[in-house]
Image (tube, grey):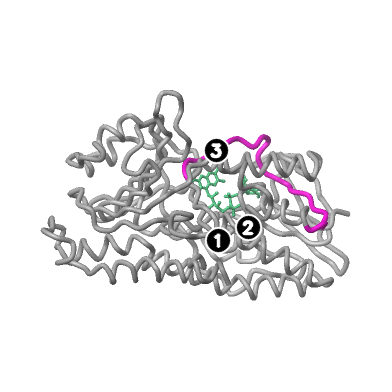
Amino acid sequence: MDEVIILGAGVGGLSLGLALHQAGIACRIFESVPEIKAIGVGINLLPHATRELAALGLEDALARVAIETKDATFFNRFGQLIYREPLGRAAGYDHPQFSIHRGDLQMVLLDAFRARAGSDRLVTNSHCIGVEQDGAGVTVRFADGPGGAGRFTARGHVAIACDGINSAIRKQFFPDEGEPRYSGVNMWRGVTRWRPMLSGASMVRAGWLSHGKMVIYPIRVTGSDGLQLVNWVAEIETPTYRKRDWNRAGSLEDFIGAFADWHFDWLDVPAFIRAADSVLEFPMVDQDPLPRWSFGRVTLLGDAAHPMVPRGSNGAGQAILDTRAMTTALIANDDPVAAFAAYEKQRLEATTRVVLTNRTNPPDAILREVYQRTNDRPFKAIGDVISHDELVALSDSYKQIAGFSKEALRA
Ligand SMILES: Cc1cc2nc3c(=O)[nH]c(=O)nc-3n(C[C@H](O)[C@H](O)[C@H](O)COP(=O)(O)OP(=O)(O)OC[C@H]3O[C@@H](n4cnc5c(N)ncnc54)[C@H](O)[C@@H]3O)c2cc1C
């Protein structure tokens, strides 16, 4: 019998597999898709997450494929600079902030897991459809892939559902919860090969959701042509949306009009968008925080437990923080039910705060403040609109809530 059954080989499942393996706890990961492919676009790993990944011995492997992000810059939709602050090591953290292609991150985790734990510890084509438990363990039921007709079971000591925002186990425990909750903002995402802009390692946020907001950051090191792979997200308040599918192609014409006059000295935004390799369309969704994650020998982790709108660069990071809490709890408690209770105690309230703050006051609250105070007009000097101290306070309060203030990490 496998000690720990992990459901899903995304960022959370693979990080958990690596952390448990490092702790000498046997586990097996069951993943729905037949083959793990490098899907997605950009993701950010902040110093609270890179600290955990460094403890798993992955910092060098990540540094080889990621961009070490140096600064955050905020602009209004007229291209005027509102605020700039250093990030990661440039801000004095002990660990870097990485901007990375989600596929590159998943491959670093996957290669490390297979090399350390053994390839047989990851079983693909195993789409979880439910779990039962008794006093001695869990029996997980699978179909052979999403929609597959074949059925089989696996027996384990405990099961941890890391199966993402449409988690089958979450649905089993909360059957009336309904579909993910639409935030009212639709996103078009893509990657463009482009010259380094600003510091060459800047995370840019510009505009505001009502007219159109852009998030732009490079995710892969410069090639011999001097170009970087640059991730971008266009976010616009839109009344209707289609259910999230990570592979759904988006259409430029549905959103590029919002950015038609964004010709800045640091970037020609329409030209940049038009040069994209491809465009994906995702609705910005989350779920209301749950009252509990653990049911005896079964619990939830990562997006399965606390899906959040991607406005604070914290989705992957909070999943990685969960894996640390989970591993510590399993080491400290022989009784898995007690371990899951300890894990939940440490993480449920903390992640609830992040989920709710991402809805109301994520880092881009800086953009909202300036948008409202200027009535969406250009300003003469930013100091007339908002003080530097206020800007710092808005940024710092999110760091504290999401658990990546320098003081918290050093402590
Ligand atoms: C294909 C894909 C592309 C993504 N692209 C981006 C992106 O570009 N930018 C971004 O910020 N975030 C993206 N995300 C989400 C991001 O990875 C997560 O928000 C975050 O990393 C938390 O990770 P997680 O492991 O909890 O969930 P995920 O990374 O979503 O991983 C969940 C895993 O579980 C598997 N799974 C799902 N259902 C089952 C089941 N029933 N049985 C077994 N396995 C199952 C999935 O195939 C996946 O591998 C993407 C997620 C996916 C699945």
Label 1 amino acid? His
Residue at point 63%, 53% (across, down): 53
Q: Quadrant of the C terminus?
A: bottom right
318 sits left or right of 41 in the view: right
Q: Find out if the beta carbon at label 1 lies less than 8 Å from the nearest ligand 1 atom.
A: no
| Circle nearer the N terminus (1, 3) | 1
The spot of residue 326 in percent (x, y) is 70, 65
Magenta highlight range:
23-42
Label 2 amino acid? Glu
The reply to whether the magenta stretch includes residue 37 is yes
Residue at which label 1 appears:
48
Residue at which label 2 appears:
52
Does the residue at mark 1 contact the one at mark 3 (Cβ under 8 Å)? no
How far apart are the alpha carbons under marks 2 and 1? 7 Å
Residue at point 49%, 72% (across, down): 353
- Residue 189 numbered mark, or none: none
How far apart are the alpha carbons under marks 1 and 3? 19 Å
Does the residue at mark 2 contact the one at mark 3 (Cβ under 8 Å)? no
The spot of residue 170 in percent (x, y) is 62, 61
Q: Quadrant of the N terminus?
A: bottom right
The reply to whether the magenta stretch includes residue 88 is no
How far apart are the alpha carbons under marks 2 and 3? 18 Å
334 sits left or right of 172 in the view: right
> Front-most of 319 and 407?
407
Does the residue at mark 2 contact the one at mark 1 (Cβ under 8 Å)? yes
> Front-most of 337 and 403?
403
The spot of residue 343 in percent (x, y) is 68, 70
The spot of residue 225 in percent (x, y) is 41, 23
